[in-house]
């Protein structure tokens, strides 16, 4: 039996090109598969977005390669239209069955979870990086480069007090690639850009007008990574006094919260849809010039869209985040309990109460005066 060609276009169930049989006549336009790599990064939609920053270096290390990615179905839209990826698999029973039949040169598991680590064990690969399971079901590092990343999960003092590396830096070490501070790789399609522009015009926002976005919420897992409704109302009142156009941004979990905030400013600000999906949400966020946000997926999306970001931190680790010199981080300086990654705060959420609203106002107005001079 003849072997199927190692060409990215060849699938075995339909012609690569109309009226040409590659199986019988040989490949007419070879696109060599090369090094076969699969990344496992399932959970944490913000983590998936951050991990896309590794793709340029991975492709540089293996210029002739086929790069696949396994993630949860709700994360997969983030990876659409990504120029570095050849295949995105949604994590499900069918995908596990398929991947158990394939062979890769390298599997890279970036998640410290039993679900991801067991998948890493199932996949046939010559080299395995990141995290796997031992015979007793314990999560363990699979390569030398993954040890620092592993220790960050085991040692709170290292993670909260000592570590100065961004997550992109130590994930690059895990993947054994260079990290020249590459940006997240996320691209809107031409149709999405057109939709974003069209929606902007439908709101009555003219080209060249300054727009401020408020990403008001966060995932339900860590509800304390968002400002109070009262803090949002305070800030919005300040910016309306300066005649600034304001968008409320968020996902399904923020629908009721945004509706409540909007009720205080009906007709004066814009409440964008929160249930249209990730990529439509990116179209709405793309309208903003500056995004005010907590440490959430909305923050990572703003970074990916290359917006000026004003991000506040409390329970999460600000040292792991890179705004790529576009914005500022507000951190609770001198607060010994932060960061903590606690879901329930025993100290009345001092980190949130410490957020400097005056500084946020000044930073927005400073950016506006520089980028949008009168």
Image (spheres, rainbow, N blue to C red):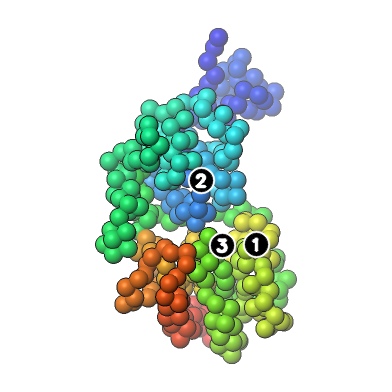
The residue shown at (35%, 52%) is 153
Give the alpha-carbon distance from disc 3 to disc 2, as whole Å.
18 Å
Given residues 28 and 126, the one toward you in this image is 126
Across and down, in percent, residue 100 comes to 51, 27
Residue at (59, 34) in percent of width and height: 93
The crowd level at tag 3 (other Cα within 10 Å; few <14, some 14-19, many 20+) is few
Residue 230 left/right relative to 338: right
Q: Which residue is mark 2?
A: 42
* Alpha-carbon span between mark 1 and mark 2: 20 Å
301 lies above or below 10: below
Relative image position of residue 130 (x, y in whole percent)? 37, 41
Q: Please name the residue that numbered disc 1 is placed on.
A: 252
Q: Is 279 situated above or below 236?
A: above
Quadrant of res 324: bottom left
Question: Which element carries disc 1, helix, strand or loop?
Answer: helix
Residue 47 percent coordinates (x, y): 47, 54
Kind of element beneath mark 2: loop
Q: Which residue is mark 3?
A: 220
Residue located at (36% from left, 70% from top): 338
Which tag, 1 or 3, sits closer to the chain's start? 3
Residue 239 appears at what percent x and percent y?
Answer: 56, 85
Q: Is residue 111 above or below residue 283?
A: above
- Say which of marks 3 and 2 sits in front: 3
- Choose mark 1 or mark 3, whichever is in front: 3
At x 42%, y 67%, the residue is 315
Q: Are marks 1 and 2 in contact (CB under 8 Å)?
A: no
Can residue 120 be spotted in the picture?
yes
Residue 64 higher or lower than 156, as above or below: above
How busy is the neighbourhood of tag 1: few (under 14 within 10 Å), some, or many (20 plus)? some
């Amino acid at each position: 039996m003849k072997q199927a060609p190692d060409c990215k276009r060849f699938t075995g169930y339909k012609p690569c090109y109309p009226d040409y049989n590659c199986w019988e006549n040989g490949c007419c336009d070879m696109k060599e598969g090369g090094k076969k790599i699969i990344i496992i990064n399932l959970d944490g939609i913000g983590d998936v977005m951050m991990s896309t920053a590794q793709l340029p270096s991975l492709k540089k290390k293996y210029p002739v390669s086929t790069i696949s990615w396994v993630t949860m179905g709700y994360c997969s839209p983030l990876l659409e239209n990504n120029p570095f990826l050849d295949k995105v698999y949604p994590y499900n029973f069918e995908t596990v069955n398929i991947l158990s039949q394939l062979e890769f040169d390298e599997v890279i598991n970036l998640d410290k979870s039993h679900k991801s680590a067991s998948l890493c064990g199932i996949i046939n690969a010559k080299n395995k990086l990141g995290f796997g399971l031992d015979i007793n079901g314990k999560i363990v590092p699979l390569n030398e480069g993954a040890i620092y990343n592993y220790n960050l999960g085991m040692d709170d003092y290292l993670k909260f007090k000592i570590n100065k590396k961004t997550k992109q830096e130590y994930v690059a070490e895990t993947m054994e690639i260079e990290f020249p501070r590459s940006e997240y790789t996320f691209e809107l399609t031409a149709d999405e850009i057109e939709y974003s522009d069209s929606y902007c015009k439908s709101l009555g926002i003219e080209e060249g007008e300054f727009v401020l976005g408020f990403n008001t919420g966060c995932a339900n897992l860590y509800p304390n990574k968002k400002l109070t409704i009262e803090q949002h109302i305070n800030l919005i009142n300040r910016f309306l006094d300066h005649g600034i156009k304001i968008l409320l941004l968020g996902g399904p979990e923020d629908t009721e919260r945004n509706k409540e905030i909007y009720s205080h400013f009906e007709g004066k600000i814009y409440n964008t849809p929160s249930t249209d999906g990730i990529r439509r949400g990116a179209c709405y966020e793309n309208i903003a010039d500056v995004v005010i946000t907590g440490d959430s997926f909305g923050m990572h999306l703003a970074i990916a869209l290359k917006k000026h970001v004003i991000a506040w931190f409390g329970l999460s680790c600000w040292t792991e985040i890179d705004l790529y010199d576009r914005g500022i981080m507000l951190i609770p300086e001198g607060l010994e309990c932060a960061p903590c990654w606690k879901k329930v705060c025993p100290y009345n959420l001092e980190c949130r109460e410490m957020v400097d609203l005056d500084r946020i106002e000044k930073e927005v107005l400073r950016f506006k005066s520089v980028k949008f001079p009168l």
